[in-house]
Image (cartoon, rainbow, N blue to C red):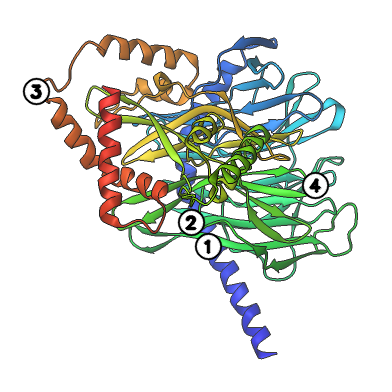
Amino acid sequence: MGKKGKREKKGKGAEKTAAKMEKKVSRRAKKEEEDLEALIAEFQSLDAKKTQVIESSCPPPSPRLNGSLSAHPEKDELILFGGEYFNGQKTYLYNELYVYNIRKNSWSKVEIPNPPPRRCAHQAAVVPTAGGQLWVFGGEFASPNGEQFYHYKDLWVLHLATKTWEQIKASGGPSGRSGHRMVACKRQLIIFGGFHESARDYIYYNDVYAFNLDSFTWSKLAPSGIGPAPRSGCQMAATPEGSIIIYGGYSKQRIKKDVDKGTLHTDSFSFADAHVCFYPLPDKWAWSRLNPSGVKPTPRSGFSVAIGPNNRSLLFGGVHDEEEEESIEGDFFNDIYFYDIGKNRWFPGQLKGPKSEKRKRRRGRQAEAEGAGDEEVEKQPPQGPVEIVKEVVAEDGTVMTIKQVISGPAEEKERSESEEEEEDGALGQQVEPCPRSNAMLAVKHGVLYVYGGMFEVGDRQFTLSDLYSIDLHKMEEWKVLVEMDPKAQEWLEESESDEEDDDMEGAEGGEEEEESSEEESEDEGGEEQHPSVQPDEKHADYLSRTEQYWIKLARSNMGPDAKEKKVVKVAHAMAKTFYEDSV
């Protein structure tokens, strides 16, 4: 009885602290958001000038992250909405709508009157009602310098059949936030978590809201039991029975003035209506903690999630940041983990390799066994993944790196082949998406599609616009649908003086800014910023700035047991080789 009383008292104290923090953040954010509201309103007035739907073929969308990619419920199409791009000086926000035709491998841009304002880190969910609906909630808008934020609390629906946007105005919904999660579950939209940030303060949420898709009303759920700590960016999935699964996520707290400590959550929870009623009642839900078996994902944030076939949810990519007082170093991932909802079990996704290559290996082993006789057959060591790096050297010596991982199938560890077979097998080696975080995922007909995202090298961020797919039923190989265009990358060093006119240009995004930036880069292309720097000096400077990146790359290829001296030596050789190839 005493322990229970203490827990209840502790829980109430935490609720009061959270309520105080929310009021504090709300007061400080109000001024910032009022400033940004005027900018958002101006953009909306420009969008309001569009009076008709215009759909046109177009190249693949520009690089971006933190958008949403959704599978059309009735057509072989993927729908991309929103997102952000940062070029080192300005943050660009988008509210463009793109449609990817799976059968034709082509993109089209759909301009629809009165769309939602520009945003990123929102959530989108598709339901099959009336020819398909795309529901969008929340997200954030940032000032061009990335120092002010506006968090949306609006709810929109895109009617896919009629190509019309509609804002749904209903009271009692969640507060403004981004980084939350939303899933469609039994004629409802369920929203959990997220965060709200101002220039000086922030708050993370663990509240739960439900929006009824029939009555168009919000209700705040109050599940009994001990639930997850406040967080953003978690994995959230709905089961066929109507339960909700939560895994992982990220949060941070201030440990002293101007010093924050981040937490990578790795716990799992579920909550469900205790009476399994079709429409949940706010007081009938209950949290329960899960202890999954199997191989869980390594701790990370910025991972992307989707629902796959066979009652499984999946997790792709992400980053594990090593936080220090003044810097953050990140390890980026490109792996897949599956969570079997029915069995409450995690397991990593592994490529099996194409069937033709498997048959080739079987024939090779048989021939080798027949021809070996009494001679000993020396086994070849397993061939680890090989990183192919496409690089563009900027005029200031900065190297832009676009990575592709080439790895043999999982069964290669057990094989023994002749030289001829190794050469043939190279043709069947797999291309994988480069490690990244904040990518956009969608699953259609059991095929996973991965678009965009970002990774970092030192202080520089690379935003991607490539598109990959993999059949989740077969798990044989990744397919490259759209390759990354190195020319789409732009990185500007931080500038101390920003003109007021840049605010409008930077926040708006869109095609005009991209065209103007291309013209500027062409004009400057003939100038050599550092004419006195010779190639060897450039190489030395490049190595000093990216040495840790190459060491991590070499270690991932050589395995965890490789000696440090050898890893460093290989890293330097890789860097030198790729530098010489690029120039």
Real-space CA distance between mark 4 and mark 1, rounded to the nearest whole angstrom: 32 Å
User: What residue would you read off at disc 3?
Assistant: 532
Quarter of the figure with the C terminus:
top left
**Label 2, on which residue?**
24
Q: Earlier in the sequence, mark 4 or mark 3?
A: 4
| In the image: residue 245, left or right of residue 370 | right
Which of disc 4 and disc 2 is earlier in sequence?
2
Q: Residues within 10 Å of mark 4 (few under 14, many from 20)?
A: many
Q: Secondary structure at mark 1?
A: helix
387 and 9: which is toward the camera: 387
Above or below, 227 relative to 24: below
Q: Nearer the viewer, mark 4 or mark 1?
A: 4
Say what amino acid the circle numbered 1 marks: Lys
Which of the numbered marks, if any, corresponds to residue 185?
A: 4
Q: Which mark is residue 20?
A: 1
* CB within 8 Å, label 1 to label 2: yes
Quarter of the image for residue 547 reads top left
Look at the numbered disc 4 and give the secondary structure of its residue. loop
